[in-house]
Amino acid sequence: MGARQQLKQLLKESKRAVFFGGAGVSTESGIPDFRSEKGIYRTINKYGVSPEEILSHHFFLEKPEVFYEYYRENLIYPDAQPNSAHLGLAEWERRGNLKAVVTQNIDGLHQKAGSQKVYELHGSVLRNFCMKCHRPYGLEVITGTRGIPTCPVCGGMIKPDVVLYEEGLDDVTVQESVRAIESADLMIVGGTSLNVYPAAGMLRYFQGSHLVLINRDETSWDRYADLVLHENIGEVFAEITKV
């Protein structure tokens, strides 16, 4: 039995599978993987500082106009559509085998594909809020404006609900993610190098029967997995989701 068929069988037998994913899940939807050779973290930007600096909490507060120029150009992809990985995960949830998706991505494509139980460790570009009166806003408050977006009610600066460098993860999201991982009988990890902490450290809470890794490149967790697929995750899910 090939690796894909083994994964399909594991999913069919699972009652509480959990998927943990990273940027590689969305690259097939046209959203760059920041840390790949062609990713925006490898490019020379026009600002004279690193993307990590621009996407830090202090930089956002000190130079919000530069932050938002970079943010609009590099982190928002409103026309992106779910690929076979997103759609496959949503289908396995509908079938009752997959109980949750824990993602490091901020693009909202899992929900767009139909997934119901999604824990977004790093937040979402789709959610924004006024830092002064805390009113919530959608993505259009960013895409439909130029410069620094401000609250039309109180005039406060609007911030994306994404976790910037120097900011901690949301406690409730972390707790719910850990609870899902602890109760999983099958853990599927896909599209992530498992180098981004503290998110990647959540795998240590898994106590179930089978750990599966799907990533084009090797990871430090490969040796602990029961099944490793160095393949495109979209192609894998397109095949294993077929009835």
Image: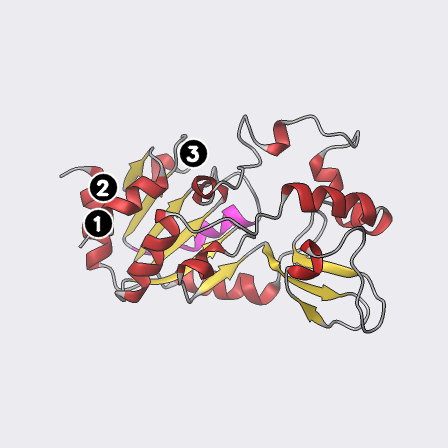
Displayed quadrant of residue 15: bottom left
- Is residue 207 visible to the viewer in this orientation of the structure? no
Give x and y (percent) for residue 19: 38, 54
Q: Earlier in the sequence, mark 3 or mark 2?
A: 2
Our reading of the magenta stretch's main secondary structure is: helix
- Which mark is in front, 3 or 2? 2
Residue pointed to by mark 1: 8
Quadrant where the image shows the N terminus = top left
Q: Nearer the viewer, residue 178 or 80?
A: 80
Picture disc at residue 4: 2
Above/below status of 88 relative to 96: above
User: Do the residues under discs 1 and 2 have CB atoms within 8 angstroms?
Assistant: yes
Q: Is residue 206 magenta?
A: yes
Give x and y (percent) for residue 100: 40, 62
Real-space Cα separation, disc 3 to disc 2, in angstroms: 19 Å
Question: Which structural element holds mark 1?
Answer: helix
Question: Which structural element holds mark 3?
Answer: loop
- Is residue 54 visible to the viewer in this orientation of the structure? yes
Tell me which amino acid carries mark 1: Lys
Residue 240 placement, left or right of 141: left
Give x and y (percent) for residue 18: 37, 57
Quadrant where the image shows the C terminus = bottom left
Tell me which amino acid carries mark 3: Thr
Picture disc at residue 75: none
Tell me the residue at 30%/37% (across/down).
Answer: 228
Tell me the residue at 23%/48% (across/down).
Answer: 240
**In the rendered structure, which segment of residues is drawn in magenta?**
199-208
Question: Which structural element holds mark 2?
Answer: helix
Q: Earlier in the sequence, mark 1 or mark 3?
A: 1
Displayed quadrant of residue 54: top right
Residue pointed to by mark 3: 219
Q: 10 Å neighbourhood of mark 1: few (<14), some, or many (≥20)?
A: some
